[in-house]
Amino acid sequence: VALAFARAGAHLALVARSTAGMESVAEALRKLGVQVMSVSANVAQQKNVERATAQALEAFGRIDVLVNAAGIYGPIGPLAECDMNGWAAAIETNLLGTAFTMRAVLPGMIARREGCVINFSGGGAVSPFPRFSAYSASKAAVVRLTETVGEEVKEYGVRVNAIAPGAVNTRLLDEALEAGEERVGKAFYAKAREQKSKG
């Protein structure tokens, strides 16, 4: 996503919990002639989001596009066996993180009467996703949040949309494979192994 925006000439503020790996991505993007900053922040913490937003605004003056791509699975397995602290943490990252970041950037977009928010909904929002209840519930909530906020801001020329990017080989896929067939279910495990091998 960052590469696509950099190729289009956008300056970028990359945000992740850890800076490990972020700076190498930033360097690759800078080679395309755009300005890139890296900010370590946890989107599940509102103060972190406010700090990251302030740093981006200081560097670039405004935020035209927000991409909410942060997401975690949370506990994998039947709800009756899930650690509920981990379940709540998935809601905090996936749903509250999306709300916190939108809340931080929307006032500026509304004032300028332009802007775009892109939220990642994921497969969990499309249909039942057994053994991934925290992820599924949070992503379904992201879709309704997106629709609701989209209605609130459309009169100001601000667009808010959600996309489900489909199967992508990310850390989430590795987590599912590490959890094993017993936790994720036979069909999903077989599908995940095939995806990992074929891309």
Image (tube, rainbow, N blue to C red):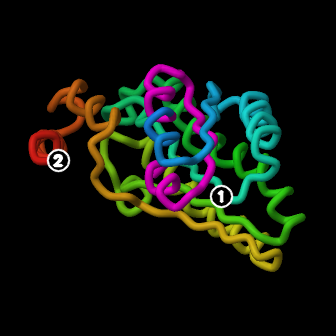
Under circle 1, the secondary element is strand
Q: Residues within 10 Å of mark 1 (few under 14, many from 20)?
A: many
Q: Indicate the amino acid at tag 2.
A: Gly
* Distance from Cα at disc 1 to Cα at disc 2: 28 Å
| Residue shown at the point (35%, 56%) measured from the top left | 128
Looking at the picture, which amino acid does disc 1 mark?
A: Val
Residue pointed to by mark 2: 199
Residue at position x 84%, y 57% in the image: 108
On residue 65, the disc is 1
Q: Which residues are magenta?
A: 1-26
Residue 142: image x %, image y %?
57, 55
Q: Secondary structure at mark 2?
A: loop
Tag 2 or tag 1, which sits nearer the N-term? 1
Residue 55, percent from left and from top: 77, 34
* Residue appearing at x 18%, y 45% in the figure: 188
> Does residue 121 show up magenta in the picture?
no
Residue 88: x and y in percent read: 56, 31
Q: Residue furthest right?
A: 111
Q: How many marks?
A: 2
Q: Which residue reaches farthest bottom? A: 155
